[in-house]
Image (cartoon, rainbow, N blue to C red):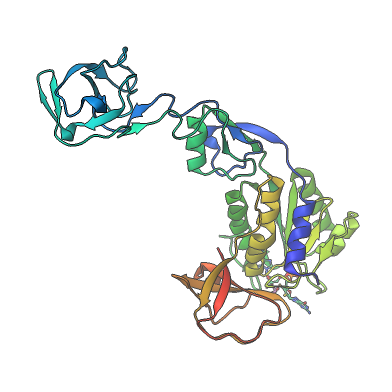
Amino acid sequence: MIDVDEAQARLIAAAPHLPSETVPLAEAAGRVVTVDVVSMRTQPPFASSAMDGYAVRTADMPGPVRVVGESAAGRRYPRPLGHGEAVRIFTGAPVPEGADAILIQEDAARDGDALTATDTVKPNDHIRALGLDFAAGDTLVAAGTVLAPRHIALAGAGGHAELTVARRPRVAFLATGDELVPPGSPTGPDQIVASITPALAATVRAAGADPIDLGIAPDDRAEIARRCAAGIAEADILVTLGGASVGDHDLVKPALSDLGIEPDFWKVAVRPGKPLMFSSRPLVLGLPGNPVSGAVCAVLFLVPLVKAMQGVTAPLPEVREGILGRDLPANGPRRDHMRAVRSGSTITPASRQDSSMLAVLAASDVLLVRQPHEGPVPAGSPCRYIAL
Ligand SMILES: Nc1nc2c(c(=O)[nH]1)N[C@H]1C(S)=C(S)[C@@H](COP(=O)(O)OP(=O)(O)OC[C@H]3O[C@@H](n4cnc5c(N)ncnc54)[C@H](O)[C@@H]3O)O[C@H]1N2
Ligand code: MOO
């Protein structure tokens, strides 16, 4: 068994970078930019007023001075401001040449064209300098960033209507097992629902990928091989679910072998998820059938792979610090990912951790991470967790 860090590192190292494509801004959220987004504009492109009031020369204040015109957003006052003059101005409007401050209207008394300040006004008050936000040539969003709405706003302000992003990885899921039926279908005796495919599809979609559901293959070596070959032809990554362990009906590894595919590694010191299998050429991730194992392995391995293929700078899940909410016995030889609830900084693992228990997973919002062979730890100790 290799450890989690090594498995993640090997996965990321093996991730091929996908080609880029351009998408309109409105469709860019969640995608990964593959080139730096460089500003084509300076913002603001002129010194502008931050308030409604009067553009003035502070040397003339408190006045009285004469109001000689108006500067509105989109329609500037066309002349420089002379001595003893002021201009009515509105938020976002260009500050006329010669003016050095905005007197807000709450601090102004006006009688016809005569304007007097009723409070002090200092140079640069309420003026947004040219280029305050960013300048042409600035890198607005670095390559490798997962685009959030805030990045999209900045790129748009910088003059971009489209962004260059990695193509979405296609991820095909094949469930295996004679006992499985799709959600919503009647379950015969000894049957259960193949519950994890829709969850993993949602997980990879949130990471920028397009999921493909290859359905359920029976425990038949030739049939699994046939369906795997179809998935490999159609997708960038094939994910198999179940049949990864050592039982007589765990046929994914032999079926892949029939296709000439041998894993780069099989079995990781991770709980849950020990029988995880990975091949880099072609890209195949064999996840264990226990649904919680699949969900946890998706967070630890599948999502980082999907992100790395899109060129994400930091593809691994963020490990945060918290305070343990209850006593824990010593951990075993595998890095453990206990389903837990976070309240403030307190992380309390559920008392039952079986990797078949979806109700416990659904009630959890974090995974408490425990290192292999960690000793017993009392409540109140520092701990580390990954948000779900
Ligand atoms: N002798 C050993 N037995 C097992 C070992 C071991 O090291 N030695 N490892 C255990 C661990 S850990 C895990 S995890 C499981 C995983 O085994 P498989 O990947 O072969 O999974 P299956 O046997 O096919 O299924 C396990 C369990 O999950 C249910 N299942 C399968 N697919 C789905 C699905 N798509 N949705 C919902 N549930 C699914 C299946 O019915 C089984 O109940 O092996 C241990 N055994
Ligand atoms: O690794 Mo298995 O996922 O412990 O149940």
Classify residue 49 as left or right of residue 142: left
Classify residue 77 as left or right of residue 315: left
- The N terminus - image quarter: bottom right
- The C terminus - image quarter: bottom right
Residue 117 seen by the camera = yes
Which residue is located at x 17 percent, y 29 percent? 62
Q: Quadrant of residue 120?
A: top left
* Residue found at the far top of this picture: 79
Q: Position of residue 78 (x, y in %)?
A: 32, 12
Q: Quadrant of residue 24?
A: top right
Which residue is located at x 76 percent, y 67 percent? 243
Q: Nearer the viewer, residue 372 or 49?
A: 49
Which residue is located at x 18 percent, y 18 percent? 67
Q: Is residue 310 above or below residue 1?
A: above
Which residue is located at x 74 percent, y 43 percent? 17
Q: Nearer the viewer, residue 299 or 70?
A: 70
Which image quadrant shows ligand 1?
A: bottom right
Q: Position of residue 329 (x, y in %)?
A: 61, 87
Q: Nearer the viewer, residue 86 or 17?
A: 86
Q: Position of residue 216 (x, y in %)?
A: 70, 58
Residue 177 seen by the camera = no
Q: Is residue 308 above or below residue 3?
A: above
Classify residue 80 as left or right of residue 349: left
Q: Position of residue 273 (x, y in %)?
A: 70, 70
